[in-house]
Image (cartoon, rainbow, N blue to C red):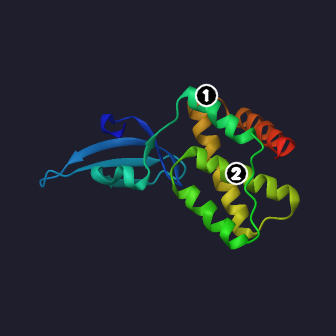
Amino acid sequence: MLVDLRIGDKVIYPNHGLAVIENINTGNDGNRTVNLRIYSNNSRVMIPFETMRNVGLRKIISQKEVNKLYRVLQNGVIDEYDNWMGRYRENLEKMQSGSIFMVAEVLKNLFYLSNQKDLSYREKKMFTKARYLIVSELMEVQELTEPEVDKKLDRALSNCVKRKK
């Protein structure tokens, strides 16, 4: 639940990744805002408390959810589309959802597609972003280095391609 956030908590800001809560302010009008610092580019964002859920802000996943994430990444279920624009739109919605499980679906779908043909420029960027979002969160949760997470992620994605249904 997001109501129990504290200064110093690490959260995920959709499409930007890992962030830390630097401050929680209450204005003269009684409205509260959460001030975040995003790790990837050191930028700062202010989010009204009432809209945190709407923008998809969430706490980092638990260790139990890490196991579920790896199961999603390697389960062999791949979405295939006849139309690249429909695929791109759906993947974009998943990326903006804030759910690491939706981002994982995008990553494995684009990984599979990249083994079939070259990705478009936009899809390459989306693939890179999805991978970054997953790797950065897993590094934090599992307390592993980037190369260690990359290796586990590559293994899961390879298993997915082998199991494709």
Residue lying furthest left: 28
- Residue 1 at x, y = what percent? 37, 36
Q: Which residue is mark 1?
A: 142
- Crowding near the residue tagged with mark 1, few <14, some 14–19, many ≥20 C-alpha atoms within 10 Å: few
Q: Is residue 67 above or below residue 76?
A: above
Q: Which mark is residue 107?
A: 2
Please tell me which residue lies in front, 102 or 62: 102
Question: Type of residue at label 1?
Answer: Gln
The reply to whether residue 6 is visible in this rendering is: no
* Left or right: 17 in relation to 87: left
- Crowding near the residue tagged with mark 2, few <14, some 14–19, many ≥20 C-alpha atoms within 10 Å: many
Q: Which mark is residue 155?
A: none
Q: How many numbered callouts?
A: 2
- Residue 21 at x, y = what percent? 38, 41
Looking at the rendered structure, the secondary structure element under dot 2 is helix
The reply to whether residue 150 is visible in this rendering is: yes
Q: Is residue 50 above or below residue 158?
A: below
* Left or right: 85 in relation to 21: right
Q: Residue at x 19, y 52 (%)?
A: 31
Question: Type of residue at label 2?
Answer: Leu
